[in-house]
Image: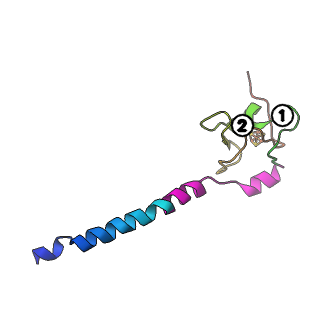
Amino acid sequence: MKDNLKPSRRQFLKIGAAALAMIPILAVSGKVMASTNAAMRSAMKYQDKPNGAKKCETCMQFTPGKAPKDLGGCKIFPGDTEISPNGYCVAWVAKSK
Ligand code: SF4
């Protein structure tokens, strides 16, 4: 009975193969985690380019990414992690200096 609880070499190989198969899935799902909030983008007329000098980078609602040029978030666009620092929407408000 106790021998039945010992994992066999075959079981180890199956688990290892399954773990290796999960790597690309996790890599892809990590990318899928980044997302846009299409409803808010549409409602607020979001665009990926600035409106003159007005852009997300200079808006008080913008949450920057890791680097200044990385995509970030917006406090009024819940769940959206792909806001461009050079984007713009009608809710733009100048960041206080
Ligand atoms: S409110 Fe609009 S302009 Fe300001 S950061 Fe969010 S998306 Fe960009």
Q: CA distance from mark 1 to mark 2?
A: 12 Å
- Single out the residue that lies furthest toward the right: 52
Task: Residue 16 in the image: state x and y as whole percent.
Answer: 33, 65
Name the magenta segment's main secondary structure: helix
- Out of 27 and 62, give the one closest to the viewer: 27
Q: Which residues are magenta?
A: 25-45
Q: Which residue is mark 2?
A: 61
Give the structural element (helix, strand or loop) at label 1. Answer: loop
Side (left or right) of 49 relative to 23: right
Task: Residue 7 in the image: state x and y as whole percent.
Answer: 21, 70
Task: Residue 33 in the image: state x and y as whole percent.
Answer: 58, 55
User: In this rendering, is residue 32 above or below 45?
Assistant: below
Question: Residue drawn at (71%, 45%), measured in percent from left and top?
Answer: 83
Side (left or right) of 23 relative to 53: left
Task: Residue 6 in the image: state x and y as whole percent.
Answer: 17, 70
Q: Is the CB of the residue bearing disc 2 within 8 angstroms of ligand 1? A: yes
Q: Which residue is mark 1?
A: 54
- Out of 7 and 1, give the one closest to the viewer: 7
Q: Quadrant of residue 23?
A: bottom left
Label pair 1/2, CB-CB below 8 angstroms: no
26 part of magenta stretch: yes
Question: Residue drawn at (58%, 55%), measured in percent from left and top?
Answer: 31
40 part of magenta stretch: yes
